[in-house]
């Protein structure tokens, strides 16, 4: 495997590890028993949550995590017919950078939903975080250390 392929693979693994840490933090902060937001299920491919508004109505919201994550935000949709939920979900499609990460997406979703429904913000919003260890990619000192530009050369072993 070329160095450039190893570098891409290492970067993908790092993103996957960060996503897994974010999922754990989100699930810990918003368990199925939470009074405002409940994480129903979460994996590296999809997150399903339930927002409970002030009247006790439950709105189910899904996020699909695509192959372009985190360069692109998760794709959110809701089973709820409520226009407020649709409005909150729509905001999530226009994020960029760090705000594309699932943890920040969930925080933004809760803020939007609470604002639109006139509900108090859960205190967990201020405390939920992930401590990330920087990933260092060690470069090997051989002829493969230069990044290949030609895609045709990527097949060589």
Image (tube, rainbow, N blue to C red):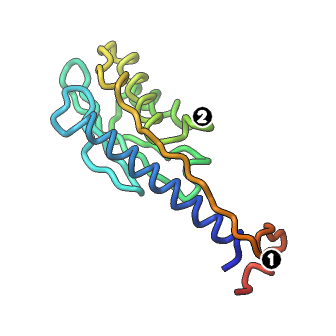
Residue for point 43% across, 39% down: 131
Image spot of residue 30 (x, y percent): 26, 35
Q: Which residue is mark 2?
A: 94
* In this picture, residue 75 sits left or right of residue 46: right
The image quadrant of residue 96 is top right
**Outermost residue toward the right in this view:** 150
Residue 129, relative to residue 79: is it above or below?
above
User: What secondary structure is found at the residue carrying circle 2?
Assistant: helix
Q: Which image quadrant: the C terminus?
A: bottom right
Q: Is residue 138 above or below residue 51?
A: below
Residue 153 at x, y percent in the picture: 80, 80
Camera-nearest label, 2 or 1: 1
Query: What count of labels does the image hold?
Result: 2
User: Callout 1: few (<14), some (14-19), or many (20+) C-alpha neighbours within 10 Å?
Assistant: few
Identify the image quadrant of the N terminus: bottom right
Residue farthest left in this picture: 33
* Left or right: 129, with 93 as reference point: left
Q: Which residue is mark 1?
A: 143
Q: Residue furthest front?
A: 141
**Image coordinates for residue 135, horizontal then vertical, percent:** 56, 52
């Amino acid at each position: 495997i070329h160095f450039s392929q190893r570098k891409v693979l290492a970067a993908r693994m790092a993103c996957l590890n960060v996503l897994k840490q974010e999922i754990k933090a989100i699930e810990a902060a918003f368990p199925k028993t939470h009074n405002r937001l409940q994480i129903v299920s979460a994996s590296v491919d999809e997150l399903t949550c339930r927002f409970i508004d002030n009247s006790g109505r439950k709105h189910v919201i899904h996020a699909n995590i695509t192959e372009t994550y985190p360069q692109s935000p998760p794709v959110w949709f809701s089973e709820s017919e409520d226009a407020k939920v649709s409005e909150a979900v729509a905001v999530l499609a226009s994020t960029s950078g760090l705000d594309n990460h699932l943890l920040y997406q969930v925080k933004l979703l809760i803020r939007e939903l609470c604002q639109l429904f006139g509900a108090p913000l859960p205190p967990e919003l201020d405390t939920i975080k992930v401590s990330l260890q920087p990933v260092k990619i060690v470069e090997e000192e051989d002829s493969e250390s230069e990044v290949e530009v030609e895609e045709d050369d990527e097949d060589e072993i």
